[in-house]
Image (cartoon, grey):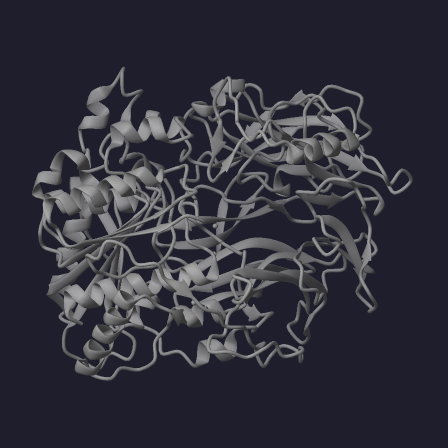
């Protein structure tokens, strides 16, 4: 179901429209070179597209104003409560999170000396993120902004000679490939095609591009698709007609177009060769597939790509395959992984071009199966499962230059750790353990990667190949981080459901000086996900610690990073062992940490976590307040509302008509009669995973029962709340709701 988005408050008034006003973003960390200063306002903002590690179900990779009269009354109440509370140090706030510069998409130069990467700054007035390409020396001595255009510049990639950085930009009015000389000068446009590009990769010859574009499958040229798009846009008929599933996905309605893989050649710049003509499925896959699902052989002759199989059955099957096709086109793609009826991801050619590494699952219909790395010999087409003995899920593939090692990262006991896998034996070696570490890249004789923790957003670091000598490359957020008093935290373990060891974290309020603190108890989504040592921009425990709350979060049965059997354990038991783990973990923390106030507990969750909040509500009245974001109330009806049917069919053992008991076993709607705890309900109007009528139903039940409740609907958000001004409102509302009912 996935992790969800931000914001909360409380009143029983029927409706309050809130208009949130702007603020503009600020500065660059002292370690970076001088950059033209943006307009200054009340908030400093800088969100990013870099999302290292959402729970699997998305997964889940992100603001002052005019208020209604009722809102002003709430603000007065908030001021009075704040005045009554003891003064505390300045912990993390939503304004701080919005001010952070968010780093992503690192790309190392061919000589290993430089890294280009994207940075997202928040334009609060425009209510969006603004992406630029930056450049840093791998030794960390130099960091500078490479592009400064107000439109979006993303996906930096190096030319083979290291003289240019290519990137995707909307500065021409559509999404096209541009390039800029590293030595200096203005960016120049490379492609001028009639359609937006979804992504690109450079061929080894430094001239051709592999590009992904949404087209009508029967269109003969890109121009034909552009003409049809234009005619459709001018038509006054806006009806949608469907003959099969899926008719919508994540947050968008299907429109009959599909992403195809093309090869663009500067010798014929006005067109491109469709390597997947007539294909009625997306490559890369929608909505989450990126250009990591396309790989080009070192000799430039072959393109590997991922496509979902199955027609209308794609709504309840998880089968994706890796295909091989000549880069010249004109031949039917061949499915390399046809024997595997489960997920296949991220094809990556070996440096010598003789092998192809693939991340793959084994059980059809299960989206949270263990992700193994398989290696295919391209001459014989034989498969070898490299990591069969390793009980972790690999999240990426990066070959060492000599082809003897693959670098990857994986959830690992509340962390996301960096590993090296020996290609000959499959033996894993831990390189970086604590924190969240991913996107490893080869940088000369060192490994460059992105790293964040509960006390720092993403920065780039390097290590030696043996995992030693950790060094920072960027310090874009160092000055901001230094000004914040962070909540101190530690990991703990306890005997949970089934007698298994379960892990969690406890965090003190920022600047804690003693006494007892109210508790924010966070429940992660997924459910196959993890709340760990990670700087999250929507569900960040430090944002509660910064408000004066202690924070507890538990990785219950079903969580990732503790072995596949632990992850599998939630199937058919959504409200069983996970609920027991949560209650037992909370009790353990209350007994272990005397600064937790057992009489002032609030529980919050999103997606599966929102479902769990509704389930908790029917099982116990120990909490003073609840927050349910994008959570299901009725698992039976939710099946008919959602788009990816494989998920409830796996989790509950089949369809509602064939396996009704699976949907009835732990269904929150059956316990509504027990509800009495004040609850804030939040939902996004574009959430087609957990549809907004589930949130409406939850609020209706609360109101009809006379339970203090408040409903916030974001018509322009999906499963997550990511627009800057909406994010500000989300955090204000949630924290005010907790303040009100815990008497903070």
Which residue is most to the front? 236
Residue 233 drawn at (x, y percent)? 65, 36
Which residue is most to the top? 658
Q: Which quarter of the rendering shows the C terminus? A: bottom left
Residue drawn where x is 84% and y is 55% of the image: 161
Residue drawn where x is 50% and y is 74% of the image: 44
Residue 632 drawn at (x, y percent)? 28, 39
Up/down of 21 relative to 109, above or below: below
Residue drawn where x is 73% and y is 40% of the image: 195
Residue drawn where x is 31% and y is 34% of the image: 568
- The one of 505 and 635 positioned closer to us in this rendering: 635
- The one of 142 and 117 positioned closer to us in this rendering: 117
Residue 228 sits in quarter: top right
- The one of 470 and 711 positioned closer to us in this rendering: 711
Residue 103 drawn at (x, y percent)? 57, 62
Which residue is most to the right? 267
Quick check: 145 left or right of 450? right
């Amino acid at each position: 179901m996935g992790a969800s988005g931000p914001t909360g408050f409380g009143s029983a008034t029927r409706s309050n429209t809130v208009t949130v006003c702007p603020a503009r973003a600020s500065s660059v960390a002292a370690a970076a070179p001088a950059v033209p200063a943006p307009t200054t306002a009340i908030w400093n903002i800088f969100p990013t597209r870099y999302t290292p590690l959402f729970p699997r179900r998305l997964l889940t990779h992100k603001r002052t104003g005019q208020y209604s009269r009722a809102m002003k009354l709430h603000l007065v109440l908030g001021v009075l409560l704040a005045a009554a509370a003891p003064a505390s140090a300045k912990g993390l706030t939503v304004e701080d999170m919005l001010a952070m510069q968010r780093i992503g998409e690192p790309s190392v130069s061919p000589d290993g000396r430089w890294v280009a990467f994207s940075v997202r700054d928040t334009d609060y007035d425009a209510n969006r993120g603004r992406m630029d390409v930056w450049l840093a020396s791998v030794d960390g001595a130099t960091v500078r902004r490479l592009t400064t255009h107000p439109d979006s510049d993303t996906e930096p990639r190096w030319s083979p000679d290291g003289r240019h950085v290519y990137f995707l930009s909307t500065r021409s009015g559509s999404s096209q490939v541009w390039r800029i000389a590293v030595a200096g000068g203005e960016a120049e446009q490379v492609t001028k095609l009639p359609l937006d590009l979804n992504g690109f990769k450079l061929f080894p010859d430094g001239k051709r591009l592999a590009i992904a574009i949404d087209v009508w499958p029967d269109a003969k040229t890109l121009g034909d698709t552009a003409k049809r798009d234009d005619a459709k846009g001018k038509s006054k008929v806006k009806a949608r007609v469907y003959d099969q599933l899926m008719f919508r996905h994540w947050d968008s309605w299907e429109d009959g177009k599909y992403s195809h893989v093309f090869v663009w050649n500067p010798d014929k710049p006005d067109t491109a060769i469709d390597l997947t003509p007539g294909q009625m499925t997306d490559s890369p896959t929608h909505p989450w597939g990126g250009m990591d699902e396309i790989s080009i052989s070192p000799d430039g002759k072959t393109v590997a790509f991922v496509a979902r199989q199955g027609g209308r059955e794609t709504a309840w099957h998880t089968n994706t395959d890796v295909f091989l096709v000549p880069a010249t086109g004109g031949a039917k793609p061949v499915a390399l992984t046809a024997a595997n009826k489960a997920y296949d991801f991220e094809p990556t050619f070996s440096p010598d071009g003789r092998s192809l590494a693939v991340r793959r699952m084994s059980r059809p219909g299960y989206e949270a199966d263990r992700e193994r790395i398989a290696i295919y010999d391209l001459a014989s087409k034989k498969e070898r499962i490299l990591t069969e003995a390793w009980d972790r899920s690999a999240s990426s593939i990066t070959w060492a230059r000599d082809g003897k090692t693959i670098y990857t990262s994986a959830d690992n006991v509340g962390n996301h750790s960096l590993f090296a896998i020996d290609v000959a034996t499959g033996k894993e070696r831990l390189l970086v353990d604590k924190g969240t570490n991913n996107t490893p890249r080869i940088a000369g004789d060192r490994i460059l990667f992105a790293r964040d923790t509960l006390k720092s957003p993403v920065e780039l670091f390097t290590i030696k190949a043996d995992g030693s000598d950790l060094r920072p490359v960027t310090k874009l957020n160092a000055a901001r981080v230094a000004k914040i008093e962070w909540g101190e935290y530690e990991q703990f373990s306890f005997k949970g459901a089934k007698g298994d060891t379960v892990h969690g974290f406890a965090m003190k309020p920022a600047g804690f000086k003693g006494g007892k603190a109210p508790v924010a108890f966070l429940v992660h989504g997924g459910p196959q996900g993890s709340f760990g040592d990670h700087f999250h921009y929507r569900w960040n425990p430090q944002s509660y610690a910064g408000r004066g709350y202690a924070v507890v979060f538990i990785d219950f049965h079903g969580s990732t990073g503790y072995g596949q059997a632990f992850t599998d354990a939630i199937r058919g038991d959504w409200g069983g062992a996970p609920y027991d783990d949560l209650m037992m973990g909370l009790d353990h923390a209350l007994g272990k940490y005397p600064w937790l106030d057992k009489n002032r507990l609030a529980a919050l969750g999103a997606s599966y976590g929102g479902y769990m909040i509704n389930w908790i509500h029917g099982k116990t009245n120990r909490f003073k307040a609840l927050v349910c974001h994008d959570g299901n109330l009725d698992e039976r009806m939710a099946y008919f509302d959602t788009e990816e049917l494989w998920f409830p069919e796996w989790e509950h053992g089949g369809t509602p008509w064939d396996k009704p008991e699976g949907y009835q076993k732990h269904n929150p709607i059956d316990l509504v009669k027990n509800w009495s705890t004040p609850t804030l309900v939040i939902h996004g109007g574009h959430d087609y995973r957990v549809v907004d009528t589930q949130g409406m139903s939850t609020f209706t039940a609360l109101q009809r029962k006379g339970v203090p409740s408040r409903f916030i609907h974001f018509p322009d958000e999906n499963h997550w709340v990511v627009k800057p001004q909406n994010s500000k409102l989300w955090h204000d509302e949630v924290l005010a709701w907790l303040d009100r009912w815990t008497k903070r």
